[in-house]
């Protein structure tokens, strides 16, 4: 059995997808690659099929109508056969040495019959010569199996992204995870939705995932995030509706604390980009979002009103300044 399935959703990716695929090929014996052509209009499918012809036993190609990033992740998960499932965006890549460490770790865990539910790695914001490493070495135990009771407190701006997690494939498949189609920012759902099912974790302090920042058409570009604020709001509302974090407060406090933390970040992002928008139609959406939260989960509403996301509702000017400072520190777009 392959150790990791790498799903690479591609849409008009001919200019950069080869870098993503090539970053994996040194370990093709231990992994499978699923390239999903999401209705591209360029040579994406041709490039994908060329790789498949070279590695017919190790690379699969899915050619489908355009459905967005979430649709590609869903399609890859449906056919994945590896022990772990990892999404690699077509404009990003994986560090060779870190991949080697990760594969060897999975082999050791498998040999001991101790495969964990989630493996966590670092990721690096790559903007030319400007790099920002995101690690968890002050929050998570390193190089050992641990559970939620061992997880430290995440500070503002610290959270697990799709880039930093490898989920056990059968756990995801059994969870019923299905990301919305034609919607940006669904990577948050991908990480958040399975968390209550996670019992065991393993953190590798390696700079595994290289996250390219700088293309004008990227979803995290500030202009695009404002333009697509309705999709950010949709994802945030879905995450609020999936389950109640308070259900875990007495039985798994660290899980409860992290779920609250993640939703606080999602509310903060939504409120912040509504504040940055100059669209008069967006003015009422902040109140509508908070009313949605209040209606669906009064306890969560009261909790977040006193957290970071609540602060962003107080003053539009403060929110804008806070965003600029955070952007400079964390280099997230």
Image: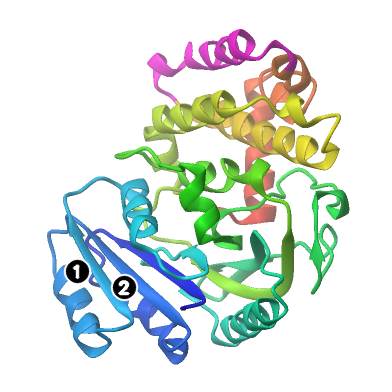
Residue for point 72% across, 50% down: 158
**Of helix, strand and loop, which mostly describes the magenta segment?**
helix
Disc 1 vs disc 2: Cβ atoms closer than 8 Å? yes
Q: Disc 2 marks which residue?
A: 17
Say which quarter of the image contains residue 130: bottom right
Across and down, in percent, residue 38 comes to 23, 55
Label count reads: 2
Magenta-drawn segment: 278-299
Q: Check the image and report above or below for 253 versus 102.
A: above
> Is residue 114 in view from this perspective?
yes
Residue for point 80% across, 46% down: 155
Q: Check the image and report above or below for 312 versus 331.
A: above
Which is more toward the observer, 158 or 144? Answer: 144
Across and down, in percent, residue 192 comes to 59, 42
Q: Disc 1 marks which residue?
A: 44
Across and down, in percent, residue 169 comes to 50, 60
Q: Earlier in the sequence, mark 1 or mark 2?
A: 2
Q: Check the image and report above or below for 98 versus 292.
A: below
Which is more toward the observer, 274 or 71? Answer: 71
> Is residue 92 in view from this perspective?
no
């Amino acid at each position: 059995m392959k150790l990791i399935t790498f799903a690479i959703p591609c849409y008009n990716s001919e200019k950069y997808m080869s870098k993503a695929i090539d970053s994996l090929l040194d370990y093709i014996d231990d992994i499978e690659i699923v390239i999903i052509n999401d209705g591209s209009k360029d040579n994406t499918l041709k490039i994908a099929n060329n790789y498949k012809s070279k590695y017919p036993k190790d690379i699969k190609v899915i050619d489908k109508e355009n459905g967005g990033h979430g649709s590609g992740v869903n399609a890859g998960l449906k056919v994945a056969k590896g022990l772990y499932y990892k999404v690699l965006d077509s404009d990003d890549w994986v560090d060779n040495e870190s991949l080697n460490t990760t594969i060897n770790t999975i082999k050791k865990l498998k040999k001991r019959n101790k495969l964990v539910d989630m493996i966590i790695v670092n990721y690096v914001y790559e903007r030319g010569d400007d790099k920002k490493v995101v690690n968890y070495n002050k929050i998570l135990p390193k190089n050992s199996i641990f559970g939620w009771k061992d997880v430290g407190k995440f500070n503002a701006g610290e959270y697990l992204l799709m880039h930093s997690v490898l989920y056990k494939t059968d756990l995801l498949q059994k969870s019923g995870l299905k990301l919305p189609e034609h919607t940006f920012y669904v990577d948050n759902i991908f990480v958040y939705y399975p968390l209550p099912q996670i019992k065991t974790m393993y953190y590798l302090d390696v700079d595994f995932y290289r996250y390219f920042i700088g293309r004008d058409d990227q979803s995290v570009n500030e202009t695009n995030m404002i333009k697509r604020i309705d999709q950010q709001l949709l994802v945030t509302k879905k995450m609020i509706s999936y389950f109640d974090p308070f259900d875990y407060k007495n039985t798994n406090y660290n899980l409860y604390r992290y779920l609250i933390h993640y939703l606080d970040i999602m509310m903060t992002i939504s409120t912040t980009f509504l504040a940055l928008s100059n669209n008069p139609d967006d003015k009422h959406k902040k109140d509508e979002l908070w009313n949605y939260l209040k209606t669906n989960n009064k306890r969560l509403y009261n909790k977040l009103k006193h957290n970071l996301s609540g602060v962003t509702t107080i003053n539009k000017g403060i929110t804008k300044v806070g965003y600029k400072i955070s952007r400079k520190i964390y280099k997230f777009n």
